Amino acid sequence: MVSEFCPAASYAVISDSTVGPRYAERLTQALSAAAPCRLLTFPAGEGHKTRETWSNLIDQLLEAELGRDGAIVAVGGGVVGDVAGFVAATYLRGIRYVQVPTTLLAMIDSSIGGKTGIDTEIGKNLVGAFHQPTLVVADVATLASLPIKQLAAGVAEAVKHGAIADADYVTSISANAREILARNPAAMADLVRRSVEIKAGVVAADEHEQGQRAVLNFGHTVGHAVEAASGYELLHGEAVALGMVVEAALGSTLGITKAGTAGALESVLQQFDLPTQLPEAWSAERILQAMRHDKKNRAGSIRVTLLHSLGEVANSGAGEWTHAVDEAAVHHALSPGF
């Protein structure tokens, strides 16, 4: 399928140390039947989503003399997709690439929409580019080997999609929790399909995040901050689960989000054993400091995507889909027992 929809003079498959031996090696061999293909890997984990990894991969491609008629194939989870996508966006000023996500989170979120990037010590995804893949191949069969924590982390993003656009989808996720956790193929296919429909629809309306695409950031202003504060010990989806509950509660306090929305989200997320309460040991000030570096911030103000109700994002007016929030209110929302 890759060689059919993205023919190239040569390929470079980029994966990590976990997924490479399981799936990427086989794909590299298969693509070699169509054109020269080499496999490049880097150590697995968010901690390796760095400028150093990006630079090393670029250097290897230059040494291999991959030309503009070549293509990159990203095989793995969100970290692999983000890094490989950024390599494709910047190598020779941009070449084609294919996303082959192998985690639920990557299938329904990071592989869709063309966002690529790397992390810095200041925060997540602060260096990157918009670069749309030529093709996305999501095979739910790869989810059979996905650890349960990784699966649940992906569900958090699915819940987010329902929270911003389809309350019935949230209800469906809750009703089918047992089948999803059992990785029932039909249930997984339905989950991936509906989430992709929602995200692709938002991206098509605002590819470069000039307005409405900001709705996809619900749960992420707090989520990215707690992810960084945890030293990336929390999975991205786990951090987003926390972020959604906190941001829904914050919205209710501000009179923007319908009362009870945070509780409704919390009950669904708990079915998948996702975290919904910030640990008391975590410093609200430390999380707030990380939020000050969020990409959505404007004029020195923290901006947060807030819900009106489950399934509907609150528009703040004048085409804005984020809200400037007072730091004191945020600090209160991050405090234990809030």
Image (spheres, rainbow, N blue to C red):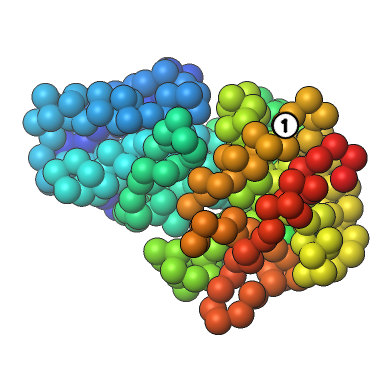
Residue 88, given in percent of the width and then of the height, sits at 26, 43
The secondary element bearing badge 1 is classed as: loop
x 16%, y 37%: residue:
10
Residue 29, given in percent of the width and then of the height, sits at 29, 25
Number of numbered discs present?
1
Horizontal side of 318 relative to 253 (left or right) equals: left
x 64%, y 75%: residue:
316
* Quarter holding residue 32: top left
Three-letter code, disc 1: Ser
Horizontal side of 24 relative to 304 (left or right) equals: left
Horizontal side of 99 relative to 245 (left or right) equals: left
Rendered view: 104 above or below 28: below
x 41%, y 51%: residue:
115
Of residues 248 and 182, the one drawn nearer to the viewer in this rendering: 248
Task: Name the residue that disc number 1 marks.
Answer: 283
**Residue 99 visible somewhere in the drawing:** no
